[in-house]
Amino acid sequence: KQEVTQIPAALSVPEGENLVLNCSFTDSAIYNLQWFRQDPGKGLTSLLLIQSSQREQTSGRLNASLDKSSGRSTLYIAASQPGDSATYLCAVPDNYGQNFVFGPGTRLSVLP
Amino acid sequence: EAGVTQSPTHLIKTRGQQATLRCSPISGHTSVYWYQQALGLGLQFLLWYDEGEERNRGNFPPRFSGRQFPNYSSELNVNALELEDSALYLCASSRIGSSYNEQFFGPGTRLTVL
């Protein structure tokens, strides 16, 4: 059974810092991994989708990497801004590839 | 292009009642997924519909059910509501029937059971 964990659970940084969020999954036979952002009480916004054949994806100040063999992904946020404050979730397909299994999220606060 | 829409935004019910939540996927998407996010808990998979059929369901009791209409919109029904059903219910859609593909989420319906 696929399980996803995220470290740290919460993170508070001053504006302008570069930071790394970590995601680990137990079954490395995944087809893709998706990173989301969730603002309090809101739905999820898709940030990046990495296919299993890719090692990384970039979008603006965000860069996500994937190491299937070690069961890890990292989300790198450059030059953080207060508007980046949110919960960041990673998700991978379950063992049957039929629905996503989500991590518990990392709650990020960027202080002005 | 319009995103995934959900209605209502908020829903307040009392224990024992039934709740109906609705979701419209992105145009061209045939798959709809439902997730529950209870306070303090992570996102839990509820149901997956594709081409009008239920393809998979998560570890939830049968009083959670739904359907998908010919226009690919979907409805989630929760019968005999219990206090612990209070949660944010999120709907997502994807282009074809596989979670190998990118999922796009709606804003959610906040269900409160009193």
Image (cartoon, coloured by chain):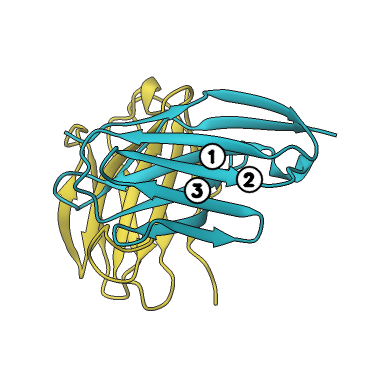
Q: Are marks 3 and 1 in contact (CB under 8 Å)?
A: yes
> At which x and y percent is residue B9?
56, 48
**Residue B77 visible:** yes
- Residue at the image position 29 percent from the left and 57 percent from the top: A52
Residue under label 1:
A88
Q: Is B114 or B34 nearer to us in this picture?
A: B34
Residue under label 3:
A36
The amino acid marked with disc number 2 is Ile
- Residue at the image position 37 percent from the left and 44 percent from the top: A91
The amino acid marked with disc number 1 is Tyr
Indicate the quadrant where residue B100 lies. bottom left
* Chain in yellow on the image: B
Please give left or right for residue B31 compared with residue B62 in the image: right
Quarter of the image with the N terminus of chain A is top left
Indicate the quadrant where residue B74 lies. bottom left
How would you rate the neighbour count of disc 3 (Cα within 10 Å): few for under 14, some for 14-19, many for 20 or more?
A: many
> Of callouts 2 and 3, which one flags the residue occurring earlier in the amino acid sequence?
3
